[in-house]
Image (tube, rainbow, N blue to C red):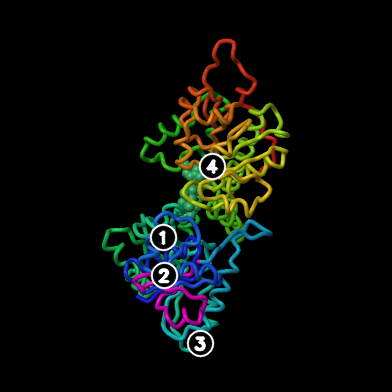
Amino acid sequence: MRLTVIGTGYLGAVHAACMADIGHEVLGVDIDAEKIAALAEGRVPFFEPGLQEVLGRTVGSGRLRFTTSLEEAADFGEVHFVCVNTPQRRDSPACDLRAVDAVIDALAPRLSRACLIVGKSTVPAGTTARLTARVQELVPPGSDVEVAWNPEFLREGFAVQDTLRPERLVAGVLSGRADQALREVYAPMLRAGVPYISTDPATAELVKVAANSFLATKISFINAMAEVCDATGADVTTLADALGHDTRIGRRFLSAGLGFGGGCLPKDIRAFTARADELGVGDAVLFLREIDEINTRQRRRTVDIARDMVGGEFTGRRIAVLGATFKPDSDDVRDSPALAVAAAIHREGAEVRLHDPEGTDNARAVLPVLGYAADVTKACEGADLVLHLTEWSDYRRIDPAALAAVAPARRILDARNALDPASWRAAGWTLRALGRPLPPPLPNQQSAADHVPAVCSAEVG
Ligand code: UDX
């Protein structure tokens, strides 16, 4: 089929390449000429494992092309996928739909051939209905254009695999014809047995925000348990393992730590509460405000514990920060918990030196005031404290004994519960983690730094 993919960010670039990979003729469209030039040369302008290979072979095959012209896209496509950003509005928790609206306003008047517009961006329930009315106003007389919603569930870092082998496909359609077109687009996935749920647009829109709300709730639940563990001396990782064996609960998304960030979970739960308020059902999702609050509290708790570990204040302290991105295997620093903590500690007077395997350029663009190190050793040289804030696998391979040679204070806070406490402690490090007990003090060795504070006072994020 002839598809266009409008918006070639993390979502659109992956969708375009993967749709070409399964055999479609694809035209990627973006207003950012630089990004389009890179993609047209087969270069991925951001970090996403596996995408380079798929982009290279599909651009090479001639099935994937790129343009900045919506005119060209309107002439080309049987199905137009809308993959533009729907961030949080600056002035409220609601979703900023300006990019989606701008695409519709520019595309619809140019649609002279029968086609389907399929939204993939995350939007508030009711958006397809609103856009359908708008499209009917704008299309040339006699044009046969329909709108459908097909939310995207891909995770950064696994975007290619999530697109080629999704766990489910959800189609919010207004007609059998639209449903048929989407079944044709995804024919190879359907043949491979991927569940395909055909429903109305409002349900499809809700599936996405409900899924992200559930995931956010799961993370904040275990982080709330981590706070209780800190107060009782229990171990949240063992608790999560034990809970996770219950197949009704499951272990995934039950890792306690610094909490969730990124371009999706935080803004999606806020936009959901805003939309529920508009619909008069705000009380039904009131709990999401608490989920958000628990999440932000992890950042404050991390700063408080870090401050405690360096003797009560950051001024004049040298702090190494390992990790800037909101999660490993991504270069994305949007609403990154790691960066929020680094910024807060810097504001309190610490000298911060940060390392991240892929996210340094993006982090520096947001926070140029921090120090940046090319490798872990340089970040940790002379550090009074090392903060492990994003669980890149590289950091689990650090040799604690070797690192002790450059950071003789040997203090580390594992805010992602991903390091092996025993090996760090065996190398003489004082290791603290969120929701995990300290080892029993050796006789005559009780240290003030081994006390987990009960109060959380820092302003973060
Ligand atoms: C998320 C959804 O998973 C995806 O389906 C949707 O399409 C977009 O939003 P993504 O933003 O890529 O994907 O990140 P995800 O892997 O879901 O992680 C979100 C955040 O939760 C990260 O900051 C991660 O560190 C954190 N997290 C995840 C935890 O703190 N604990 C966990 O157990 C799992």
Question: Residue drawn 42% across and 54% down?
Answer: 49
Amino acid type of disc 3? Answer: Pro
Image quadrant in which you'd find residue 192: bottom left
User: For residue 176: magenta?
Assistant: no
State the quadrant of the N terminus. Answer: bottom left
Residue 232: % across, % down? 55, 24
**What span is colored magenta in the figure?**
60-83
Residue farthest along the top direction in this orientation: 443
Real-space Cα separation, disc 3 to disc 2, in angstroms: 22 Å
Tell me which numbered mark, 2 or 1, is placed earlier along the sequence. 1
Camera-nearest label, 2 or 1: 1
Residue 255 visible to an observer of this rendering:
yes
Q: Secondary structure at mark 4?
A: loop
Q: Is residue 151 above or below residue 71?
A: above
Query: Where is mark 2, residue-wise?
Result: 173
Q: Is residue 101 above or below residue 271?
A: below
Q: Earlier in the sequence, mark 4 or mark 2?
A: 2
Residue depicted at 43% across the width and 62% down the height: 14
Q: Residue 231: which disc? A: none
Query: 323 or 109: which is nearer to us?
Result: 323
Which residue in the structure is indicated by mark 4? Answer: 375
Check disc 1 and report the residue beneath it: 52
| Badge 1 amino acid | Gln
**Residue type at the position of mark 2:** Val
The quadrant in which residue 432 appears is: top right
Q: Is residue 270 left or right of residue 240?
A: right
Which of discs 3 and 4 lies nearer the camera? The answer is 4
CA gap, disc 3 to disc 4? 57 Å
Residue matched to label 3: 140
